[in-house]
Image (tube, rainbow, N blue to C red):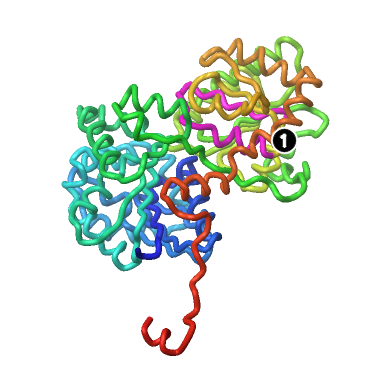
Amino acid sequence: MLDPVFAFLAFTSGSLEGAIIRDMRLANALHRRGWRVVVYWMMERNAELVDRGIPQRMLCGGLRYQFKRPSALMDWLGGAVRLLPPATRRTFVQRHPAYVDRLMTNCCRSICDGGQSDPALVRRLLRLMRKDGVTHLLPTFAMICPFALAAKERRTHSFDYLVTFQGEELFANYAQRLGRLDEYHQRLREVVGGSPWPSIAVSADYARRLTAEMGIDAARLTVIPPGIEMPTRDRPPFEALRRKFPQLRPDRPFVTYLGRQDSEKGIDLLLYAVKMLREQGIDLDLVVCGGTSFGERYRDVLVQMSQHLRLGTYHRRRVPDEVRDALYAHSRCIVYPSIHREPFGLVAAEAMSHGTPVLVPNYGGVAEVVEVGGRRGGLTFNVWDSGDLARQLRRLVCDDDLHRELSANARQVAANFTVDRMADRVLELLGLPPRPEPTRAPASAAEAART
């Protein structure tokens, strides 16, 4: 058997979303354990997420899908765009949602075709895998697995792929607009059947949803939650917040939303809830941070709503890692008010790893994150209900005993979702040991000659 070589087929629009963070953490974990790893980027690249020593290659850029038919010429021209700084490219993407929408819609056409309408991409994928000796292909989303299946069916390079479901319903929206939702679901069922391993769902709720909405065989699904890096340093100082939030005070409680500022995240519910508490005489501040994947229209609306409600919200786009960690550590709680049936809750797990309680809806995989084995690191509220969100938020802000209890539990709950646990379970699923066997030195000159 060939020594395993892992290739991550990383699909990203440029925003640092949970799925790409999950996959690059897994890639780094495997690399640190001694496995051979390579990353192939699609659409955009987030090179800063990848450890040094891991080769990174561009499979295709977003401009490939500028038109209804994939264009190798536009892909080549896109190489000049990729010379721009990543922050510049992300800013452009976030401010031109119609552009991203067109690229994603056209990419979805190829996916619904089972990858057959983009044979050049399949050939390039095969060339890269042959060059790198890839044996295990791990696409970020199940929705790009039709390209992997098309490559496998050509039988010019021996490899298998692992299907991971962690956001397919968002891509289904593009297929629905094309009038090809049934084809999209059929492609997903085909790629599940084409892999030798059960497919990964990132939560038990999401596995049930995949079966109910997309017809994925429940017997072909296994649940492996994403992994987080547990903090190894001391609690970051409050002063780390000064550069971005000079008016925040350590003696005044504040609650924080961290994540994408897109409409399905329900941040407006949090604005209403904070307004309710303010009118009840509860003094607290609100911080909202994060980029977007679908343009800044919703973010602009949030700013207008905050001004109208006279909340004085501390509103920022993406913040540096050290500021994010300080927000996790010093917030009274982290609130994730999504109206979407989230597959998982990476932000909630990360917040608890800093000992900070979280507040999440009782809906979707995110609700599975806050309580493990009867131990709670946060509370839930009735989904879509800003009134109940306000009630539960009041408990976290005003009930010091409850807050201490949840804070004491939070790190232990988060420890169930570490990167190492995720890596162990993925390797076990693939039938591989936690670490590769060390290469044995030849016992003699004669043996060396034979090898």
Query: Does 267 sit left or right of 61 as displayed?
Result: right
Q: What stretch is highlighted in magenta?
A: 332-353
In this view, 132 is above or below 6: below
The answer to whether residue 294 is seen in the rendering is no
The answer to whether residue 21 is seen in the rendering is yes
View extreme (right): residue: 251
**Where residue 87 appears, x then y in whole percent?**
49, 51
**Where residue 186 appears, x then y in whole percent?**
22, 33
Which of the 4 quarters of the picture holds residue 209?
top left
Query: Does 270 sit left or right of 3 as displayed?
Result: right
In this view, 390 is above or below 18: above
Which residue occupies the foreground of this view, 23 or 194?
A: 194
Q: How many marks?
A: 1
Image quarter hosting the C terminus: bottom left
**Where residue 69 appears, x then y in whole percent?**
18, 46
In this view, 396 is above or below 221: above
Secondary structure category for the residue under label 1:
loop
The amino acid at mark 1 is Gly
Which of the 4 quarters of the picture holds residue 268?
top right
**Residue drawn at 74 percent across, 43 percent down:** 242
Query: Does 97 sit left or right of 225 as displayed?
Result: left
**Where residue 425 appears, x then y in whole percent?**
50, 45
Q: Mark 1 points at which residue?
A: 355
Near mark 1 (Cα within 10 A), the count class, few <14, some 14-19 or many ≥20, is many
Magenta stretch containing residue 340, yes or no?
yes
Image quarter hosting the N terminus: bottom left
Magenta stretch containing residue 14, yes or no?
no
Which residue occupies the foreground of this view, 439 or 145?
A: 439
